[in-house]
Structures are given as C-alpha cells and as structure tokens.
Amino acid sequence: MEIEFIKELALTMKEIDINELEYSEKNGERIKLKRNNRFKSDFEGQKNIREYNDLDNCQSSYEKKDYTDNTIKNIDNQNDVELERNEKNKQEASEKLEEEKNTSIKSNMIGTFYSSSSPGEESFVKENSKVKKGDVICIIESMKLMNEIKAPFDCEISKCLIQDEEIVEFGQDLFEVRGFDD
C-alpha cells in the first residue's frame, strides 16, 4: 500500500465522520486507521466543546501480514503436536500390552475355575502351550453359568496358577504367560 492511498483513506474518514477503519487487500496486506479525537474548551470556561478532526490528528497503524502462511504454520505445528501425542500414546499402549503379555492372565469374574470343559477331559491349555488371541483357556462357573475365558492376546502359558474347582476372585492371576511373535 502506498502512503497516498492511506492519506486518502484518512481524509475520507474525516469527510464522512468515521472514527475507525480497517482495510485488507487480497495479498494479505492490512491497514487499520483510528482517528484521534481531541476536545478543547473555550477560554471563557463555557461548556461548548469543539472537536478537531485534522489529518494530523489521525493515528494509523499499518501492518503487513501474510495470514495464509501463519495459518498453515499453525496448522502444521498442531498436526506435529498431535502426531507426536499419538505416537507417544501408541508407544505407551504397546509397552503396557507387552508388560501384560509377560506377566499373567487375570480372572475377569468371581467363580469356580475349571481347566477343561468337563471332568476327566483334557485341559484347554497346559504349561508351554501356545495360544492365540480368542482361544478358550479355561472356564469359570459363576451363578450356575459356565463362562469361557479366552486368551486376550497371543501368548505362551508358562504356568497355571489355579487348581480345578478352586474359587477365584475378580482380578486374580490365573496363568503366568509370556508373549511370543509369529
């Protein structure tokens, strides 16, 4: 923007009695003009007040900004922060899952533990058995209902911690396990 154009804007503001004006161009340049209204009383102490509206009394603040670049930079920064946060959450979840995989499988209910579907049949799992996520590993009877307990992830059973017909509590360890990758 040229200074002559800014002066024309200021004169127009004076002519049509506007105190504030903002003007923007397509290229991102922006100007904001404010009139500085001064009041002066007459020497005799009368109540009449006169307003001065000279061009010299008009303040202008001229700023050139490229809003598009700043907006894109802000969006890029937000995306970077969000990607970093997502990566951190994925890593924490992976570490938590890995930690769980190398510890135990817990009971998700209270009831009676059974290692097989009926007495005298082979157990669902034994020590060193490899199981896939979703495989039945035991049954817990609760309120006369037989509930299949499934492996929450791929793992190898290290040790069975509960005997048949033993009462288990919610959150009690049933099997020691370790994760494996196929």
Image (tube, rainbow, N blue to C red):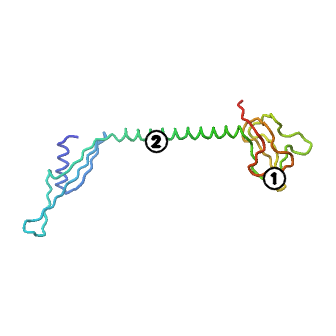
The C terminus - image quarter? top right
Residue 127 spot, x, y in % from top left: 82, 36
- Residue 78 marker: 2
Residue pictured at 78% horizontal, 53% vertical: 110
Q: Nearer the viewer, residue 20 or 118?
A: 118
For residue 173, side relative to residue 27 (left or right)? right
Please name whichever residue, 88 or 168, is drawn nearer the observer in this view of the structure: 168
Say what secondary structure mark 1 lies in: strand
Q: Amino acid at mark 1?
A: Gly
| Earlier-in-chain disc, 2 versus 1 | 2
Compared with 167, 81 (above or below) is above
Going by the picture, which residue comes out furthest to the left? 44
CA separation in Å, label 2 and label 1? 49 Å
Res 6 quadrant in image? top left
The image quadrant that residue 175 belongs to is top right
How packed mark 1 is, by other alpha carbons closer than 10 Å (few <14, some 14-19, many 20 or more), is many
Residue 85 falls left or right of residue 40: right
Secondary structure state at the residue bearing disc 2:
helix
Q: Which residue is mark 1?
A: 111
Which percent across, then down, holds residue 84? 52, 38
Question: Of all residues shown, which one is farthest toward the bottom?
Answer: 46
Nearer the camera: disc 2 or disc 1: 1
Q: Position of residue 72 (x, y in %)?
A: 41, 39
How packed mark 2 is, by other alpha carbons closer than 10 Å (few <14, some 14-19, many 20 or more), is few
The amino acid on which the numbered mark 2 sits, given as a three-letter code, is Gln
- The residue shown at (13%, 69%) is 47
Most extreme residue toward the right is: 120
User: Is 31 placed left or right of 68 in the picture?
Assistant: left
